[in-house]
Amino acid sequence: MTLTEKIAETAAYIEKRTIIRPVAGIILGTGLGRLADSMAIDAELPYSDIPHFAAATVEHHAGKLILGTLGETPVVCMAGRFHFYEGHGMAEITFPVRIMKALGCSDLLISNVAGGLNAEYRRGDIMILDDHINLLGINPLIGPNFLELGERWPDMFEPYSFELQEKAIAIAAKLDISVQPKGVYACMSGPSLETRAEYRMLHTIGADAVGMSTVPEVIVAVHAGLRVFACSIITDLCTPATLCPVNIAEIIATAGEAEPKLVQLFQELLKR
């Protein structure tokens, strides 16, 4: 079965189980699943029931596709994403983005948690992504290209919509939410966290934050013609002056504390 055939089969399966026809997709990161609590939910589909979907194996990832409305906007939301370090291939990681496009989405909103490399950042800050550095050593578009899904050589000058960034900055100012604009996100494979030398390298090459997700999905979203907005909750500080062993429980707690601000930001951003 070709990729396009898999997309058609999966999209048809989902459409039969919901009245929602989403215009925006949302991918939620580690510890950031409560945004779904703000949705008027029409359908919740476990990944294990959806044809051609991988399984989410990471703790704090619910592993279900949620369709409903956020505010008045019809959305499809991934409560739990797929990571390279789980052993998933690039096609599996990015397949949900293809499905969001097939369901009718024109925009994609992504959240993640990340370590802060910028000395001006503080725990709990929301960084708005403007650019990224792909250090995975692989690109999800390697292999045969299907022109009906996107062009062979998509331009990555604007991976994160300038328009959505500016709108988010204005919303944050209105709601008194502190954000760090124009962030550069570096994507590493994980699951091991970075060494001290790697943190220094990332800082040197211009990264403001580092994480283990988002970039594959963004590349495929750009290929598919979606507008992308992404933000990172800075859960720990990784500058040379602040390096110390990472506490995963603290990361989850910091993400949870910042999540209400993220929910507000996404709700307003989706208003037409």
Image: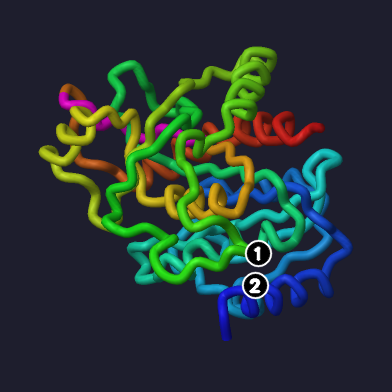
Left or right placement of residue 5 versus residue 32 in this view: right
Quadrant containing the N terminus in the rendered view:
bottom right
Q: Earlier in the sequence, mark 2 or mark 1?
A: 2
Task: Specify start and end residues of the magenta stretch as a single range.
Answer: 231-240
Please name whichever residue, 58 or 156, is drawn nearer the observer in this view of the structure: 156
**Residue type at tag 1:** Ile
Please name whichever residue, 189 or 36, is drawn nearer the observer in this view of the structure: 189
**Residue type at tag 2:** Ile
Residue in the picture at 48% in, 58% down: 152
Using the rendered image of the protein, determine whether residue 190 is visible from the camera's viewpoint.
no
Q: Main secondary structure of the magenta part?
A: strand
Membership of 202 in magenta stretch: no
At which x and y percent is residue 76?
71, 55
At which x and y percent is residue 91?
47, 68
CB contact under 8 Å: marks 2 and 1: yes
Label number found at residue 7: 2
Residue in the picture at 19% in, 28% down: 204
Label number found at residue 99: 1
Residue in the picture at 20% in, 40% down: 245
